Image (cartoon, rainbow, N blue to C red):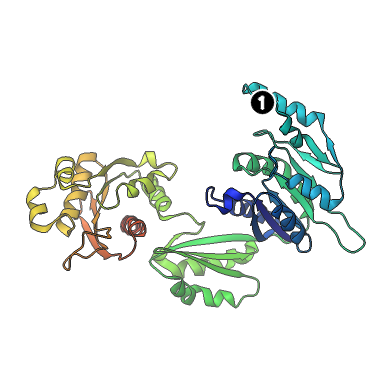
Amino acid sequence: MIVEVLNVGTELLLGEVVNTHAGWLAKQIFPLGLRLSRQTTVPDGPAIRDGVWEAFDRADILIVTGGLGPTTDDITREVVAELLGRKLEASQEIRAAIESRLSARGYAFLDRMLRQTMVPQGATVLKNNHGTAPGLYFPSVSHPSSASPHIFLLPGPPRELQPMFRDSVLPVLREIARGLDSRECRIYRIVGLGESAVEQMVGLQLTSNPDIEVGYCARPNEVDFRLIARSEILDAVEPSLINALGKHLVSSSGEGIEANVVASLTARHLSLSTAESCTGGLLASRITDTPGSSRIFHRGFVTYSNEAKTDLLGVDPALLKQFGAVSEPVARAMAEGAREKAASTFALSVTGIAGPEGGSPEKPVGLVFMALAREGKETLCREARFATDRLTFKQLATQAALDMLRLELL
């Protein structure tokens, strides 16, 4: 079955709002055996008609998001009613629901909101418990020369769309998709290898299997290796895949390296602290973005200046003067100071030159030192060079630091 999403909203095309609908919807429908084939975005106004009409010839299921509001540019409802030849009728039930919602918040019902009470003949109303715009569902209807797709009109804001989709749309889609061959998608998160290396190592032999769909998604120092097939097929190939990837495999469920680290520390009742300079707190942020991190994370130090490194971490000023802030001795001292101050099992430190300024021939932009202080063991230190933009540098540096700890925990 061909499933398409048509996103309506000028704000999406101006970059004012990030469009997250396709990713979220695709994950919701995949377990039903449905795949998203196309996503289109059009501005408010007349372009909505063209977008809907073009999808009629391709899609079996069309999900339209946005354009259901009370203003004159919100014409999704009217466009679909026109294309299907349906008359619009006012619903007193919808009006009462909108008035009740507005009254509870101290707002008055305005005449322009009447358009949100209009329902095309033959459409099923999808209740909106989080806003004023109800959704609509039009079952597929056969015509002498063609058939209209199943059409779902949903509000644009995710806080309204997502609960409506779960409560009202998924049950309908489940019936529509009954009997389809459902497949499982497994994502293997890999670090320290590029996508070409992953393909050479494990991808090529799996590509030759017609029952398995293979895909790759590369990010800085990270690759998602994606397999789609029936569960029993994936179960059969997974052991050899895990064995081949070895220490490079972080997760077989798409989780990031920070989740891997937090889970490993939690399982062993160990703790972690961080000391950061060039990454400005990103390392601590990545760890604490992971649910359950409060059980293992003791303290995070952001010591951007030399004075902060000395005052907060106890780094010897003589080390800073002799070797400079971006050096192996200072990285070690930062990690050891953080572990001592926080009384944690481990401490990670990062110090480097993010750029674009501040480099020298001896210490170029992109140079970074990462250290791992360990209870009862010698502190480890790694040097790397990530000559890239500032934000990517921070991502790569924190990734490398986390990988030091991940490998230690192996």
- In this orientation, which residue lies closer to the viewer: 243 or 349? 349
Quarter the C terminus occupies? bottom left
Q: Looking at this view, name the residue that lies furthest to the right.
A: 144
Q: Is residue 258 left or right of residue 179?
A: left
State the residue position of label 1: 102
Q: Residue at coordinates 34% horizontally, 49% vertically from top-left? A: 282
Quarter residue 369 falls in: bottom left
- In this orientation, which residue lies closer to the viewer: 140 or 118? 118
Quarter residue 297 falls in: top left
The kind of residue on which mark 1 rests is Leu
Q: Is residue 257 left or right of residue 136?
A: left
- In this orientation, which residue lies closer to the viewer: 298 or 308? 308
Rendering coords of residue 92 (x, y %) = 81, 29
Q: Residue at coordinates 58% horizontally, 51% vertically from top-left? A: 12
Rendering coords of residue 183 (x, y %) = 66, 61
Helix, strand or loop under label 1: helix
Q: Residue at coordinates 21% horizontally, 59% vertically from top-left? A: 358
